């Protein structure tokens, strides 16, 4: 006999894996109390499973319908009541497995307070805070992980930009960056795209206003970094940005438009800055990458004449964002800044996992200023990520660890 989990419990499981324990608890408590079948107010749309293709920016997610029967009367017989009680006991057992304990509650809206943590955070010891930032371009919420060792010295800061359909908590769980932050001693922030700005939660890397300095989303994300720098003890020479997919494309733009803020950039399964000027050209660039340096809309980028050191990860089986885009992130840097670099390739393999090729690009002083990781056999997913988050491939080299290593070797140089 095959057990079919009720759709409400499937939804609760998804919320729990995302670290949204308050919503999961509320849903299950209503189900146990007989309310069943109702989606909690403000519930997020279902997140894709690992390895599933990212929906394109012009597609609106739809919550799948569930097989609910309208007008079903409650049990009236003693046998039916006994069956209902047994069902509630069974569901309470599922509840305890899903949640373990009652989550902490936020004390006030908009305040930076501790909230329930995703699974990838359990072996960390710091604080995961929630806050928001506003400027003329808009408002975005963000999560901030402050490691337990904070306060001893100014720390590096890493800004992490999620991909389409992901949330800040989901991205933190999948990349396990909070755990690295605890071990290595740095702060990590996760800006979150709003559904009002993009129905799929994608960063709008293809909009002209969102590719300029002091405009649109780049100004908001750079503003979040600056706000954290003003509030916490942050080493201003060690502020970095990384992202996945649309977040990777946004990270490339931030490196080009704010090289005075970000000392190095990580682009995972993303595209080079200036690749598109609208949704149509974005979809074209995702399928058929072109060197953006000669495109007219690439001129909208307003950096300060210096590209930052960059590390790129891309799976060579990515069918959502063509792997050639990762190569063009490197090409763009070599063409505009480091044309005389010496490239050296290093093949490798994760034990029991994917093989890969890492290509280091050395400057005249022997410093590796660009790294390109091609993960053979991997698709559109964060390499080496944890299964608690979406779009992760645990069989690849650990992109989080390698990016942190690369970042910490590249403090900002004088302009």
Image (tube, helix red, strand yellow):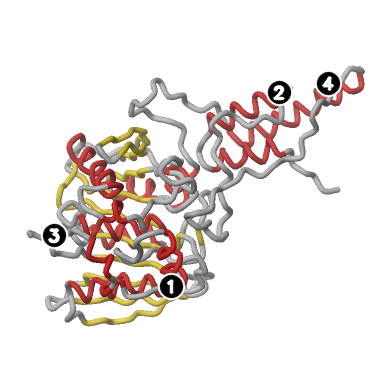
Q: Residue at x 21, y 54 (%)?
A: 262
Q: Position of residue 213 (x, y in %)?
A: 21, 52
* Residue 304 badge: 3
Mark 3 Cα shell of 10 Å, populated few (<14), some (14-19), many (≥20): few
What residue did someone put label 2 on?
A: 35
Q: Quadrant of residue 154?
A: top left
Report the mark closest to the observer, 1 or 3. 3
In this picture, residue 334 sits left or right of residue 143: left
Mark 4 Cα shell of 10 Å, populated few (<14), some (14-19), many (≥20): few
**Looking at the image, is mark 1 or mark 3 earlier in the sequence?**
3
Of 1 and 279, nearer the camera is 279
Q: Position of residue 216 (x, y in %)?
A: 28, 47
Q: CA distance from mark 3 to mark 2?
A: 58 Å
In this picture, residue 347 sits left or right of residue 368: right
**Looking at the image, is mark 4 or mark 3 earlier in the sequence?**
4
**Looking at the image, is mark 1 or mark 4 earlier in the sequence?**
4
Q: Residue at x 17, y 42 (%)?
A: 153
Q: Residue at x 43, y 30 (%)?
A: 115
Q: Position of residue 317 (x, y in %)?
A: 51, 72
Q: Quadrant of residue 23?
A: top right
What residue did someone put label 1 on?
A: 323
Report the mark closest to the observer, 3 or 2. 3
Q: Residue at x 26, y 41 (%)?
A: 224
Q: Are the residues flagged by discs 1 and 2 in contact, CB closer than 8 Å?
A: no
């Amino acid at each position: 006999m095959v057990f079919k989990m009720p759709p409400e419990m499937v939804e609760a499981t998804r919320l729990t894996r995302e670290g949204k324990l308050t919503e999961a608890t509320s849903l299950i408590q209503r189900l146990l109390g007989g309310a069943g079948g109702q989606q909690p107010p403000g519930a997020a749309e279902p997140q894709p499973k690992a390895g599933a293709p990212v929906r394109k920016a012009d597609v609106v997610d739809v919550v799948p319908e569930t097989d609910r029967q309208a007008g079903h009367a409650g049990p009236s017989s003693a046998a039916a009541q006994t069956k209902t009680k047994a069902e509630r006991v069974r569901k309470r057992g599922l509840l305890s497995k899903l949640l373990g304990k009652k989550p902490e509650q936020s004390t006030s809206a908009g305040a930076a307070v501790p909230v329930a943590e995703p699974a990838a955070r359990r072996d960390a010891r710091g604080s995961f805070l929630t806050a928001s930032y506003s400027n003329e371009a808009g408002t975005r919420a963000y999560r901030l992980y402050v490691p337990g060792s904070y306060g001893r010295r100014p720390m590096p800061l890493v800004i992490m930009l999620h991909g389409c359909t992901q949330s800040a908590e989901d991205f933190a769980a999948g990349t396990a960056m909070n755990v690295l932050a605890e071990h290595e001693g740095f702060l990590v922030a996760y800006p979150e795209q709003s559904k009002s700005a993009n129905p799929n939660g994608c960063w709008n890397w293809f909009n002209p206003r969102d590719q300029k300095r002091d405009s649109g989303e780049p100004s908001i994300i750079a503003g979040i970094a600056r706000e954290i720098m003003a509030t916490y003890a942050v080493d201003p020479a060690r502020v970095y940005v990384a992202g996945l997919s649309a977040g990777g494309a946004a990270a490339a733009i931030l490196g080009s438009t704010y090289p005075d803020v970000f000392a190095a950039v990580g682009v995972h399964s993303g595209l080079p800055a200036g690749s598109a000027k609208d949704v149509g050209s974005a979809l074209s660039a995702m399928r058929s990458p072109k060197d953006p340096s000669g495109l007219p809309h690439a001129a909208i980028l307003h950096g300060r004449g210096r590209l930052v050191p960059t590390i790129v990860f891309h799976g060579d089986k990515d069918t959502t964002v063509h792997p050639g885009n990762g190569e063009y992130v490197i090409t763009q840097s070599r063409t505009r800044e480091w044309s005389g670099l010496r490239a050296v390739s290093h093949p490798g393999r994760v034990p029991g996992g994917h093989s890969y090729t890492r290509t280091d690009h050395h400057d005249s002083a022997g410093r590796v200023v660009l790294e390109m990781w091609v993960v053979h056999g991997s698709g559109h997913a964060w390499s080496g990520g944890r299964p608690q988050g979406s779009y992760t491939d645990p069989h690849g080299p650990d992109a989080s660890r390698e990016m942190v290593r690369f970042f910490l070797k590249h403090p900002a140089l004088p302009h």
